[in-house]
Amino acid sequence: MEKWLVWNDKRWVVDDTAAVYRMAQGTARSIYAEASRQPEDEKRQVLGKWAIMSERMQRLDAVVTLASKQ
């Protein structure tokens, strides 16, 4: 079974804590910050909706799956 490795500031360790999913979720949540910086309401709303969709487990699974193929 393949496993993710994460850096713990000293060395690479096996990800037994779902850190890779927390990182993917953090990336999805960063879209909210991007939306908040948008001066146009319409663009802000579109980005906000995209952020909500990006936080869904199906989307997070897709991110992790795509990253595993790189």
Image (cartoon, rainbow, N blue to C red):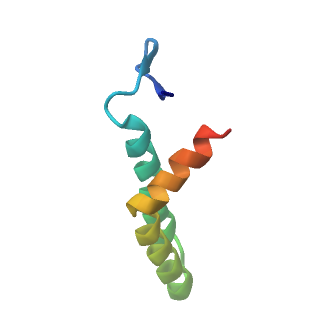
Residue 8 x %, y %: 40, 20
Residue lying furthest left: 17
Is residue 43 left or right of 48 when viewed as pictured?
right
Seen in the picture, residue 11 relative to 51 is either above or below; the reply is above
Viewer-side residue, 21 vs 29:
21
Residue 6 x %, y %: 46, 26
Q: Residue at x 46, y 12 (%)?
A: 11
**Quadrant in which the C terminus is drawn:** top right
Which corner quadrant of the image does residue 68 belong to?
A: top right
Which corner quadrant of the image does residue 32 belong to?
A: bottom left
Residue 36 x %, y %: 45, 70
Residue 44 x %, y %: 50, 79
Viewer-side residue, 24 vs 34:
24
Which corner quadrant of the image does residue 55 belong to?
A: bottom left
Q: Residue at x 39, y 59 (%)?
A: 57
Q: How many marks?
A: 0
